[in-house]
Image (cartoon, helix red, strand yellow):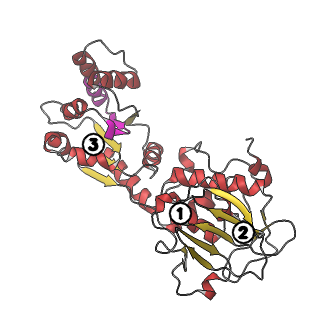
Amino acid sequence: MSESFVRFFTLSDVPFSKEVQDSHLWLPPSKAEIVEEVCEAVHEHAQVLLVGEPGAGKTCVLRAVRHRLPQAGFRLTYCHNATLGRRDFYRQLCHALGLNPAATAAAVFYAVSAHVESLGRERVHPAFLLDEAHLLHQDTLDHLHILLNYEWDSRALLSLILVGLSDLQDRLELRKNRSLYSRIERRLSIGPMVPDDTAEYVRLRMSRAGADREVFTADALTMLHEAAGSSLREIDRIATAALREAARRKKKVDLSAPGPPGRPASLQAGSSSRAGCASFTTRRLTSAKMSALAIRQDADPREEASAVASPGRRTVRVGRALRDRHPGSGLLSEGGCSSRGLVRRQRDLGIDALARRDGRLALRGT
């Protein structure tokens, strides 16, 4: 725990670390429903397809399923290396099951199927969780439905949970994969998060790290949602970069100096009570320097925010007066930044360069 911002914000731990216990995983209502559906499918000895974009929380759903299912009566086996050929895939599965794989493809397949039948006699239902399944070789996909065939296809002794990108469903819908796809009863998809989900997630992670006050402003959370594109990994990365940069610039929440009505308390330096404004471009931004999304920089309070357009670059300065002065500009909505005026593509957001110009922080894209 060597991060300087942990000490600066008096936290007890790094807030956005991936090292989170299964019982402490954050799940919005949409993902909680998916966890329930996967658990129901395993109880029913059914097959599951779960797809979602990178960072959407697919593995988090699997971890929540592992935490939710009782250990008595179920045996979960997780495999994440899907880039192997068919024989090596079954050899990997044997190792995960604690078996000694033989040399030939037929022998390793027999070892896995015999193990599944043995668990069935013990009234234990196994479930194989295949992560990154969109990377499975075609010869492995061709063979997986045979792994589900027991006693003349009259008993459901195994649950197969295929997890991957949306490309996986496109592959399974092909005619050559219909034998496997027709056996998958539950076909689930993780959708994008809404801004409220992002705000709840950030506040929960900060609270569990020991934060006793609001560190991210409402505008910062809105921009963070736009920049991360509903990816939890991107939220973690950008929020950590923002905290690190805020600590480096010695910016901290001052609850005794609240911001304008309807806004959270200003993040200020020292005893200054001046709310800042940050200027940034919407042309091409990366998230390496996103501190302005987490802190309000000092600026002259007499300076009013304005929208400035120049050839080849569109710059938007966000300040306390923007909404009042330009109600019809479309640059800000009631929830923060509008996708029409501020963000053309969610995943292209971020910050490229820092520069101080005329006493204010300018975040300029390349």
Which residue does the numbered mark 3 point to in the structure image? 45
Which residue extends farthest top?
103
Q: Is residue 175 left or right of residue 214?
A: left
- Assess whether mark 3 and mark 1 are in contact (beta carbons under 8 angstroms): no
User: Closer to the camera, 346 or 84?
Assistant: 346
Q: Residue 97 occupies which quadrant of the picture?
A: top left
Amino acid type, residue under disc 1 in the picture: His
Q: Is residue 13 left or right of residue 105?
A: right
Residue 124 in the image: state x and y as whole percent: 34, 33
Q: Is residue 158 left or right of residue 211?
A: left
- Indicate which disc residue 225 carries: 1
Please provide the residue range marked out in magenta. Answer: 113-135
Marks 1 and 3, the one that precedes in the sequence: 3
Numbered marks: total: 3
Which residue extends farthest front?
311
Amino acid type, residue under disc 2 in the picture: Arg
- Label 2 packing within 10 angstroms: few (<14), some (14-19), many (20+): many
- Label 1 packing within 10 angstroms: few (<14), some (14-19), many (20+): many
Which residue does the numbered mark 2 point to in the structure image? 296
**Measured Cα–Cα span from mark 1 to mark 2:** 18 Å
The residue tagged with tag 3: helix, strand or loop?
loop
